[in-house]
Structure formats: structure tokens, C-alpha cells
Image (spheres, rainbow, N blue to C red):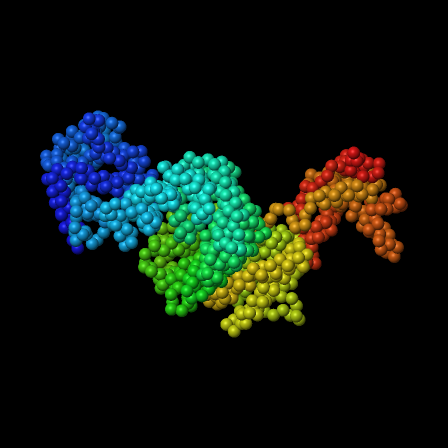
Amino acid sequence: MATSTETERYIQFLLEHLAGRNEHHMFEQIVLQIALRRLSSNIVPATGPVSAGGDQGRDAESYYTSLPHELPGAGGFIGRATTEPLVLAASVQKPPLEGKIREDLKSICSRGEPVARVAFFAVYEIPVAMRHRLQEHARDSYNVALDVFDGQAVAHLLTQGDLVWIAQRYLDLPSAMIPDEPAQEQPDWYRATLTALRERPGKRLTPGALSEVRDGLRHAVLDDEARVDLPEWLGYIGDFVEDEDDDLALRARYERAWAVLRGKNTLDGVEPDIRAVIDAALSSERVSLLDDANQLLLTWGGSWLRHLGTVSAEELRDLALRLRERTDTLIKNTDEAVYPVRKASLLDVAARLCLHPRWPEVTRPASGALLTALETVRLRLAGEIVPEISVESRPVDVTDAMDYLERLVDLLPRARAFPVGGVSETFQMVAPALTADPRYEKVRDALDTAQADIAGDSSVAARCRDRAMAFLRAGRALDALHELHEVKINWWHGDTLRGALLTMRMIGKIYGDLNLQQAARQYALAAAAVAASSPGAEHEDILPAALTEAMNYTYAAGHWGDALALGGLAFMTHHLYAEAPDDYPSHAYIQQLDFHAGMVMLSAELFRPDLSSALTQLTDTNYLSDLDELLTELRPSFTYTEQQFTRNTEEQLNGRPFSDVGPQRELNFAALGTTWRVRCDNTRTTALAAERLTAALQIALTELAPHDPLFLPQDIHVRVITGTPFASRERVTFKPDNRAVDCTVILSPYSNSSDSQALERELSAAVVYLLAHLSARPTQTFMSLVEKTFARGFRHKLLSVRLYDEVAGLLTESHYDTLRQTAMQPWTDAAFQPPTAPALAQPTTPGPGYDRTRALGMIRDNYAELPQALSETLPRLLADPAALAGLRHLREEGWLDWHILVALVNIALNLRLEQLSPGSIPPDFPARFLEIPESDYTAPLPLDAFTPVSLRAQMELTVLSVGQRRWKLSTAMKTPNPVAFKQLLIARYSYGTDDVPHRDLLNDTPHENGSLLPPAA
């Protein structure tokens, strides 16, 4: 093989030989092919007969479009292509050439369309000084830019890997003279196919040839360097479009439309291709053609979203409905007993057509707001999350789609040959839109089973991963978590263990994004533990990133002493296992590690200097030395006041900085309306046990969230101790408290000899018992929800891989001793308020069992019946200025009239009971109280018993009764929290807003029958 220099000299010789034969037309073809790949693809020859004005000095010129717009994201020369009007001029004339070039410039610039740039190609060399004179002349005389490519430059271009074929075709360059160091490496099959097409004397329009061209075209679209060949491939595919074979032409039209959209980010010239394929499908019996039409129509819709093409939303919807109608006809005419695979294929197409958005209802984003089609394809191929418009803004015909999908999965056992991969992939992508349908799990599980039968459990994991990515795109983190936990299980074996470890890190990230830092820490550390102990050390490179992530979650939890120590471990493993460890910029996690460690050290240095000496004992001295240089750079910019620093950390963290310092450590988080404050002694064993419980609670809350556990919105104070309960007491005990939950949890300490299964049972039992006391659902109902979570794999999610204490026990006893024995002034006396992630906010939808019609009926009964029980007392209260003022004050607080009536009647009932002697109270007196006219009582009720204070106290008891009697709510707490109960009723049961028309309690008198309801019409 020749070197590039040898080839360049030989090509220059061939060019001069070309000039000697005066083969100007051949040189024009060479120039045109070079320009198409180096200057712009929007160039057409501009030659013409002299009688028609000739070529006006222009051998070729550009039209409007240019490479940067046609080929977005392309590398190499395409990224530098001009967007200006361009004219090519070529000459085989011998020197001197200065006069020739000046004449051509005059001809080009004085006639024809305006031009901004001229590229002049010559066979012979042009001195540099002459080139500069000519460029200055072009700029000064015609205000155009001039590029000059002489013979040496042309020869150099023709030695390059993607252009050398031009020299082969037009200069007959021998194969032995092709350089063996091509500038742009491409796969052998690709180069071989392209070479064969270029050397083929005629067209070969066969199905096999179309397959070759299709593969090359798709490669040119997706590969940045190969995309320079895209215009050539489009020419080859165009030959099939023009062929008389309708089948090949339709297939070629499909490929051309796909390639132009993804390769050029335009639909210019190919919308007729899309329409031709769809029109043919509307009268075809072929399932494959219907599928092609479905794919193109969906792609067309995506283009409409990006403001490409001329199609309207209405036309897209009409075509989808017509294709559905055609598919329905074929479904009805296909006997599944005879043709089960064809029937399944038609059901597949029909389902996917139903999943096309109803485009007229979609709000189109601004132009440029979405990724290009090519960028989207690349992200999906890489398994990345694709940002796109939300599922909620893409209305689809879910019920119709699930009808077809249910029929399809029912048919699968008889349609063994049906390729389930296509419908499976579509299902993953649109899963967020389908989950509300009651048949979702049936279809999902059937497709997973069918895929597993073909490709094994790892394929199910891949499907779960795809669904998880779809849920993340839709902002559905909890659904994504469930799918990723399934990935972890199905990939938990040797060949795919690495994927399982990466999945565990993704699970940790989602928990972290949900502000559940202990659960996040558990999964990051579990991934690190397995990576460290995997056979053959093949996954040890995961260690530094996993430990850094664990440090990030620990930092977010406010445990900055632990975070600094984990940072030192991450730094050490980085230098042990990372590739090129000293190349810090190539490892993104190093920046996170350094930032958090820097914040720990600088905040202590500036605001709590007494901590600095303790912090230096917590981590590796080499890491601290490495950190010193960073701290020197950061100090000038670290100018916060303590107040600013405290405010920023309150907004950004889940715990106050250094909340792991001192004799007690604390863990804070919030979810589903509950705010958790976990405390424990700051010893290694107890701290790990408290973190074990906290991580388990956080995981349990994410599992219960989709089932609406109906937790009361309140603070939960948990004290964790290790040991064994005395006298067979429960491991979870509650102290009396009507304003919050105050409990103690006793957990067994972990040791190397611990029975892991016994600890797991103990932990899950403690979590379930504690959460059951926080729910307003009846215990039996709540436990049925728990059973659902266990059926969905709660146990393996709780454990991750190993017990928490085992994977998190990286820090020594002395580490905890140092933190426990260090004193620190509190940042503030106010309680920390941990943030709640939107996905775990308290629900605001109507609560379980709520029925507005029933609620209004009971309120109507209150207005009809309760005033009669106060027929004597109510007029006295309204006539008393102090009592009336108190009632008006309650109204200003938001009390409705029926709230006031209920509280008044309950106080009256209690007062009447006090007036009766204990032995004379009939057993049914409370039930008959409303039936007894108040005039039957001899003693009037004291008005001072109906103050706002007493009414509020009574209402606290009343809300419990309202919840229990009306909505079957309950609580397992012996001392329930009435304020929390009222907040729940207001948020979920319209307690503060439901009302019916009635007479004003404070300004109108009851009707003659004693009712406050208006007279019946």
C-alpha cells in the first residue's frame, strides 16, 4: 500500500495528465463530488449551451439548503459547511491563471443570482501570493469571499478516506495506490457496499439490492462521519422509488422518508412518499404495509410537533382513524383459528394505531423546543431518558388500545410464531399512559412472560428497564422504582450482574430525588459492597462512583461527619480501581466528591471552628492533603454569613449540617403528609440500627404510596434503641400524645453472627406495626394494602442485597466515638422542616369512601334535626352579645354553620348527662337525645359552657366521630391526634367546604318546625 504522500503526488500527476487531454468535463465532475462532501450537499451543476447563455462562468452553484441545517449534529467537515450562496468554478487551464480567475469572477458576479462565496478549483498549482491577491480583489471588487483549491489541494483532498473513491472512478487510481490509513474509519461491510455501488456499471433494482442500500442508508443517518455520504445514499434509494416494482418502490419510499427526517431534520420532498405508503396501506391486505404506514404516520406526527412538513393535526388524526378502520376490517375477516399469527399481527397494528395521540388536542411546543428526530433516536438507543412532552399532554385512545392488547395477549398461546418484540417495545414506551386501565397488569405480565419464553429472564429485565425509563420521562418516579426493582432481581446473576449493580445505583438516585436519603444510601452502599466482593474483581471499577453517591446522599441527610469519611473511602478506591485515576476531569464523580467535602470543611472552618480538629480525624490524610488545594481556591468565594448558610442548607438538605455530631444523632424526612424525626444514641451499633429502620420506613412509604394509605398529617417522633424488650413488650411502644406521634422502637443489634432472616422479619414487622398506627384506614383495610406491597416484592426491596448494617458498616467504632464526643452549638432552636418530594406529597384527591351526595345528605340532616335539640338554648346564645361574638369568631376561623351546630349539640348532650343522676340515665339516652324537646328539661344550660374554647375542644372530639361515622375512618392510636384528623378531613373529605343551602344560623330564626333548611318547594 502507498502512503498518503505518495498517493497525493500520484493523483496530482493524474490531474495534470487530465489537463493535458483537455478533459474539462471530467474535472468538473471531480470538483462537484468533492464539493458535495466538503462544502455543501445542496449543489447542482450549472452548465448549459452557449446559445442559452452558457454557464456564466459557473460550473456549479448551491440552492437554498445547506449542510449545517440538513445534517444537524454531523461531525468533521459538515460542522464547518457554509450557509451562504456558493458558486463553483473549475479550470484545467495551465498557468498563468490569475487572468482566468479574474475573468471568471467578473462573469459569476455580474450575471445570475447574487453570490456570497466562490470556490475556484484548478488542476495546477497557484502560488500563495497570487491566491491572496485574488481573494483581496474578490472582496474589494465584488464583496464576495473566494476560496482557491489548486492542484495540490485537490490531490490532498482526494487521498482522504471518504473521497479516494472519486480518484478511483474519474482518474482510474489503482487499488495499490489507495492509502492504508483512511482518515475516517467505517465498518468493512459499509465501505464494501458503497464501493460496489459506485463501481456497478448499471442499476440493480432487486429486493436484495434494496436491503444493501437500506442498511447503508441507515448507517449514514446514524453515524456522524458517514453522514457525509447521505446524499449519495439517497440517490441510490431514489432509483428504487422510480422503479416499476410497486412493492420495492413503497419500501424505498419508507426508507427515504425515514432517512431524510432523521438525517436532515426536514421532510422536504418526502411527504409525498409518506402519503403514498399510507394510501397504499388503506387498500392493502398486507399487514407489513399497514405496519409501515403506522410507523410513518407516527413519525409524521412527531414532525408536526417539531414544526416540520405541511401536514395538519386534523389530517394526521383522519389518517389514523382511516387506518384503524382498514385494520378493523381485516381483523374481522381473519379467522384466528386458522391464521392466529396474522390475527395477532393485525391486533398489534390496531393497538399501536390507537396509541397515536389525538393530534388536534395536543398543544404543539414552540419550534426548536423538542429534540430532533435523530437526537431522540440516539438517546433511546443509548438507553437514556428522552425529554419529551408529557403523557398528560398527549391524549390517546387508551381503552381502545387496551381492548386490542388484551385480545392479543389472550391469543399469544396459540400464536407462538408471532414476534412479540415490536408490541412489547411500544408498550414500554407508552406504559405511563396505560397504567390507569384495570387490564394494564394483565397485559404487562403476559407480554413479559412471552418475552421470557423467547429470551429468558434477562429480557424481562430489559423490558422492565424500558418501562422504568418511560415512567421517568413521564415524571412517574414511583412507577419507575417498581420496574427497576424487577430489573435488579432478573439481572441478579453472573452474566448481567453489572447491569444489576448499575440498576441499584439508579434506584438509589431515585430515592435520593424523592428526598429519602437513607434508602438512597442503602442502595448505593449495597452496589458498592457487591462490586467489591464480586468474583474476579471485574466490577471493582463501580466502587468509587457508588461510594461517592453514598456520600452525596449522606451529605443531603445532614450527616456531614459521615459524608466526609465516605468521601475519603471513595477517593481511596478511585486511586485503586479507576482507569487513569489522576485524570480527574474524566471522572465526573470526583467533582461531586470534592464539592461536598469542600463544603463540609469550609463551613466548619467558618462557622463551627471547634469541629475542624474532629473532622481531620474522620478521613484519609492523603485525601485531606489533596483537598487543601481546592479549599485554597474556594475560600475567597465562600463568603456566606451564618444566617445565609443556614437558610440555604434548610432549603437544599434533608437535615441540618452535622446532625450526626454530639451524643444524639437525628434523621429527618417527610412523605405522604407525615414528618419523621428519628433520634438515637450516637454509637455505631445504635446509629446503624436507626438508619436501618429509617431506610426501611422510606422504602415502605414509596411502596404504600400508590395504594393511598391515608396517613394522618402529623409529626412522628421515633426514638431508636438496641436490645431486647422487657417482659415480652412490643418492640414498638407509643407514649400518650394528642398532638404528634411519640414512640420508641427497640431493634436487635447487628453483629457478624446475627441471623439475617430473623433481623429482616423483626424489621418488617416493626415497620408495618408502626405504619398501621399512622393510617386512618381501619386496621384490616390497611393490612390488605400491606399484603399488596408484599405481593409486589416489598421484602426484596427492603433488604436490597444484604442487611443495611452489613453494607453500611464501613465506618469504625472510633469514627462514631469522635462524633459523639464532639460538642457543637445548634444552628437554631427551631425544628428542622424536611422537604417533601412532589411524588410523595399528601394526596389531595377525594379520600377513600368519600361520596359527596351522601355527605350533603348528612349535612342536610344536621340542619333539619339539630336545631330542635337546642330550641331553648340557641335563642339565648344568639341574644347574648358575648356568646354571639364567640360564634362569629368561629365563623371567621372557617367554621361552617353545621360545624357550630354539631359542637353545640355535643356540649349540650354532655351537660344534660351531668344534670342526671348516674343511676337514672336510660341506656339509650344519647341515641334519643335529639328526639327529646329541650322544653322537657327544667334546668336551662349555662351559656358560659359554650365559649369558643370549649367549642374548639369539643370539635376536636367531634371530627373523630365524623370521620368514623361518616367515612368509616379509624385509628389504632389510643391517644389520637384530632388536629391531624381534622386536617385530613379538610384535605380529603371536603370537611371545610361541603355545605347545603340553609337559613343563616346566626342571623335567621329556624323554621316553625325547628329546621334551618329552606321550605320544600
Total numbered badges shown on the rendered structure: 0
Query: Considering depth in this image, is 657 or 190 the residue closer to the camera?
Result: 190
Q: Is residue 515 above or below residue 283?
A: below
Q: Position of 632 compared to 607: left or right?
A: left
x, y percent for residue 809: 48, 66
Q: Which quadrant, please, contains the C terminus?
A: top right
Q: Residue at x 48, y 48 (%)?
A: 349
Q: Is residue 61 above or below residue 601?
A: above
- Does residue 427 show up? no
x, y percent for residue 570: 40, 61
Q: Residue at x 80, y 35 (%)?
A: 1015
x, y percent for residue 10: 13, 48
Q: Position of 1009 compared to 192: left or right?
A: right
Residue sitting farthest toward the bottom? 753
Q: Residue at x 69, y 42 (%)?
A: 994
Query: Considering depth in this image, is 246 or 28 the residue closer to the camera?
Result: 246
x, y percent for residue 345: 48, 51
Q: Position of 581 compared to 866: left or right?
A: left
Q: Residue at x 20, y 34 (%)?
A: 89
